[in-house]
Image (tube, rainbow, N blue to C red):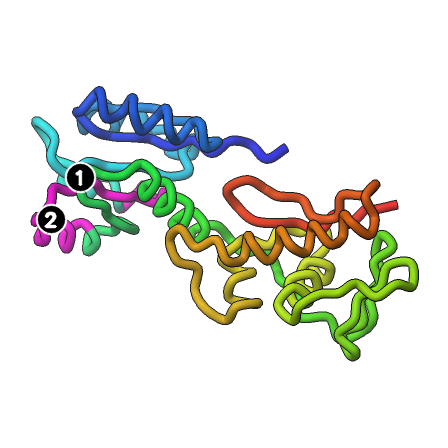
């Protein structure tokens, strides 16, 4: 099971911290708080505990920008800033100091979640991705012929659209590895993954449904929540 990623939320607004924490924990993260820069510095002494920090710029005492400037030479974890609307100069300074993204307050928890996931995808080392298969592949009873662009199960042709075929081909070629949604979107749809973009999820779901109809006793494609999809390698 994939370990939960831990986030550090630095904001003096206690109610906002609790609201965002409830939402993010429901989405599979662990969340810790700091309500001022000094608390954040103490917690960041073990910065390897955290996958990402959400940092409010406007706090009493030392500001978020001052904190970012202080820690950035030695703390490399990704940072998303929360800024007041219209504070363009703060956003620019934050990005120049090494923030990875920003979001205006009051923020929508769902948009913050999308930005967190996008920043984490960009910051994590990518799994080595195998190119589109150039020879026939058989796995778990699924026979894929890239030359004919056909998939057969028990000798029967599985009807797939061109996009669905490409989804399955990339997943099978990388069986056992997780392909994140950003990778799959770029490989299959030839564009960047946008916030709230569910297109690749829809195509994977249709492939999964067609495989399940042909072989209902097997699970071929595993969803790795918040990351992407994996074709299960050790199918009997």
Q: From the viewer's perspective, is residue 138 above or below residue 235? A: below
Residue 81 appears left or right of 236: left
Q: Secondary structure at mark 2?
A: helix
User: Which of the pair 35/115 is nearer the observer?
Assistant: 115
Q: Secondary structure at mark 1?
A: strand
Task: Give the class, few, some or many, for how many residues have Cα within 10 Å of label 1's Cα (few <14, many ≥20).
Answer: few
* Quarter assignment of residue 148: bottom right
Q: Residue at x 64, y 62 (%)?
A: 167
Task: Give the class, few, some or many, for how many residues have Cα within 10 Å of label 2's Cα (few <14, many ≥20).
Answer: some
Q: Residue furthest right?
A: 155
Q: For the C terminus, which image quadrant? A: top right
Q: Is residue 84 magenta?
A: yes
Q: For the N terminus, which image quadrant? A: top right
Residue 31 appears left or right of 168: left
Disc number placed over residue 16 in the picture, else none: none
Question: x%, y% of residue 25?
Answer: 42, 27
Question: x%, y% of residue 213?
Answer: 78, 49
Q: From the viewer's perspective, is residue 135 above or below residue 112? A: below
Disc number placed over residue 105 in the picture, else none: 1
* Quarter assignment of residue 67: top left
Residue with the mark numbered 2: 90
For marks 2 and 1, give the CA distance.
13 Å
Q: Residue at x 44, y 59 (%)?
A: 193
The answer to whether residue 131 is seen in the rendering is no
Residue 167 appears left or right of 175: left
Residue 201 appears left or right of 49: right
Q: Residue furthest bottom?
A: 147
Q: From the viewer's perspective, is residue 39 above or below residue 3? A: above
Q: Which residues are magenta?
A: 73-94
Question: x%, y% of residue 65?
Answer: 15, 42
């Amino acid at each position: 099971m994939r370990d939960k990623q831990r986030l550090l939320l630095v904001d003096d607004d206690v109610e906002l911290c609790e609201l965002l924490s409830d939402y993010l924990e429901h989405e599979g993260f662990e969340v810790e708080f700091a309500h001022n820069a000094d608390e954040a510095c103490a917690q960041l002494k073990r910065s390897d505990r955290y996958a990402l920090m959400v940092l409010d710029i406007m706090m009493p005492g030392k500001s978020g920008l001052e904190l970012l400037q202080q820690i950035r030479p030695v703390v490399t974890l990704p940072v998303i800033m929360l800024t007041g609307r219209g504070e363009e100069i703060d956003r620019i300074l934050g990005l120049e100091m090494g923030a990875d993204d920003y979001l205006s307050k009051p923020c929508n928890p769902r948009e913050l979640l999308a930005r967190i996931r996008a920043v984490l995808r960009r910051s994590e080392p990518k799994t080595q991705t195998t190119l589109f298969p150039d020879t026939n592949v058989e796995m778990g009873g699924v026979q894929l012929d890239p030359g004919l662009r056909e998939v057969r199960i028990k000798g029967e042709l599985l009807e797939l659209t061109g996009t669905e075929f490409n989804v399955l081909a990339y997943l099978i070629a990388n069986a056992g590895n997780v392909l994140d949604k950003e990778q799959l979107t770029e490989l299959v749809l030839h564009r960047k993954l946008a916030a709230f973009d569910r297109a690749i999820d829809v195509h994977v779901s249709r492939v999964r449904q067609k495989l399940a109809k042909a072989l209902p006793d097997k699970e071929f494609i595993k969803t790795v929540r918040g990351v992407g999809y994996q074709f299960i390698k050790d199918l009997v």
